[in-house]
Amino acid sequence: MPKKQPTKRQPRYLDQTSTQTLEEGLKEYYAANPHVTLPSTQPTEFGNILAAHDALHVIYACDTGMYDELRLLPMSWWTSECTFKKYLSMKNSPAVDQMYDDMIREKGSLWLYRSVLKVMPRLVPTVVSLWFKTRDRKKQLPFFGYTQLLDQSLLKIRQDFDLLPLI
């Protein structure tokens, strides 16, 4: 009988009730995702956008698969200081354009469209539910100001910003 391969341990930051700090979660995020571009290797403006985006991955308990990448966007628009309007202005950065161009050159347009279409049946109901759950929110999670939360536990951040029902 073939030997079963050990399963990879899920990062702790993906646990809804993780008590690790945001800083610990970010370290774990980068260790678990070596394919992720490190913000420190990028020009300052783009590096700051990447770092804030990565912090949202950890706070919202999202991995780097297509489903969570696409879920992260509306979650951030509706629950953080990174509104849709701010997202569009950041998206118009030459560095962001370069990132998308590089991804398409590396994996191809067909891969991108296929990946998006594959998760849509599961994603659409989730996004609709998120929209209803996030209506009239008063307290917004900091985007570029995420560094003020580095020493707080993920559970506390998720509770303080009422994110647990969304994760």
Image: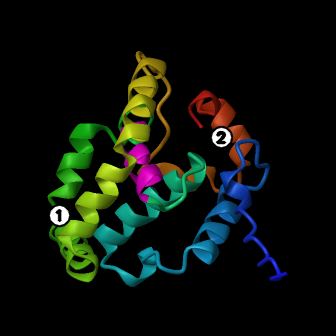
Mark 2: few, some, or many residues within 10 Å (few <14, many ≥20)?
A: many
Label 2 belongs to which residue?
157
Assign a secondary structure to mark 1: loop
Label 1 belongs to which residue?
93
Dot 1 amino acid type: Ser
Magenta residues (range): 66-75
Mark 1: few, some, or many residues within 10 Å (few <14, many ≥20)?
A: few
| Residue 51 image point, x, y percent | 45, 64
Side (left or right) of 163 relative to 15: left
| Residue 50 image point, x, y percent | 39, 65
The residue located at (45%, 32%) in the rendering is 126
The residue located at (67%, 61%) in the rendering is 25
The residue located at (37%, 71%) in the rendering is 47
| Residue 73 image point, x, y percent | 37, 45
Q: In which quarter of the image is residue 33?
A: bottom right
Looking at marks 1 and 2 on the same chain, the residue that comes earlier in the sequence is marked by 1
Quadrant of the drawing holding the N terminus: bottom right
